[in-house]
Amino acid sequence: MNEAVQLTHISHIYGRHRVLYDVSIAIQPGIIFGLLGPSGSGKTTLIKVLLGILKPALGQSIVMGTRMPSLHQMKHIGFMAQSDALYPELTAQENMEYFASISGLERQSVKMRVKSCLETVDLTSSAKKQVSSFSGGMKRRLSLAAALVHDPDILILDEPTVGIDPVLRETIWKEFHRLTVEGKTIIVTTHVMDEAEKCDQLALLREGEVIVQGTVEELKASIKADSLEEVFLHYGRVTS
Ligand SMILES: Nc1ncnc2c1ncn2[C@@H]1O[C@H](COP(=O)(O)OP(=O)(O)OP(=O)(O)O)[C@@H](O)[C@H]1O
């Protein structure tokens, strides 16, 4: 078994509300895996279980052979949550240096990694500005740079490009593809169809269940659809 991530029979409830039901997903290394699903379908909850932040009622999450939660394994994971966890009183550069230091990155690599990740998200010219003066999109980009700074093997991104303009979004996706060529694994949640199209593999969640998994082409072929949007609408409607 050399999956980057293996989620096995995950179920979870909040109070009486069933949020995840018997979710099993295996993610191979070196691909972009998309978790697609309408709002409230359980994507963020599944990410939290994957990371070991949330203990599921049933099932387990194994990341690179280690059962989560594992502090050691977290060093090899970059995580960008839906809400930005930045220090507004610090500059972008200071935020990056802080995240680099807590991620265990070697001191001599910090400067180079901070510079390169700020370049990736087009924030070099704002590196010395206080984050409190940033727009929503700039904060999102900085959060992405912070998730990348320690050069993680697995990158988990919860709606990474919300609030980011189409041109920069394209650049960021190119960077994701470059990272997979290096052997990194990227897991993104999205409900943006043109982003889902760029994923190597997808799982479609609805009301906490995986409805269908496969490549974009496999998903389209499953219902003879021309577009992923049709697939999304079809499976969103179907009740089993
Ligand atoms: N801490 C919590 N306590 C109770 N219910 C919760 C909690 N967190 C999430 N939920 C509920 O669990 C369900 C799944 O939420 P989750 O955030 O995982 O969905 P999502 O697919 O990520 O949605 P979105 O695309 O809007 O971010 C929702 O009905 C949500 O209201």
Image: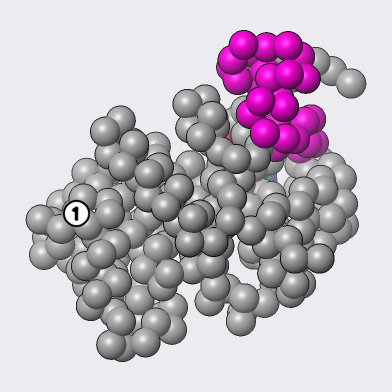
Rate crowding at label 1 as few (under 14), some (14 to 19) or many (20 or more) other CA atoms within 10 Å. Answer: many
Q: Give left or right: position of 77 versus 215.
A: left
Tell which of 109 and 132 is nearer to you. Answer: 109
Q: Is residue 4 above or below residue 150?
A: above
Quarter of the image where ligand 1 sits: top right
Q: Is residue 221 depicted above or below 91 in this figure? A: above
Q: Amino acid at mark 1?
A: Leu
Q: What is the quadrant of the N terminus in the image?
A: bottom right
Q: Secondary structure at mark 1?
A: loop
Q: Which residue is mark 1?
A: 123
Q: Which residues are magenta?
A: 203-232
Q: Is residue 84 above or below residue 52?
A: above
* Magenta stretch contains residue 229: yes
Q: Residue at x 61, y 45 (%)?
A: 33
Q: Which x, y percent locates residue 157?
A: 50, 51
* Number of disc labels: 1
Residue at image coords 22%, 44%: 135
Q: Would you say residue 170 sits in the magenta stretch?
A: no
Which x, y percent locates residue 54? 69, 61
* Quadrant assignment, res 151: bottom left
Question: Looking at the image, which residue is at 10% across and 56% down?
Answer: 125
The quadrant in which residue 137 appears is top left
Image spot of residue 18 (x, y percent): 81, 41
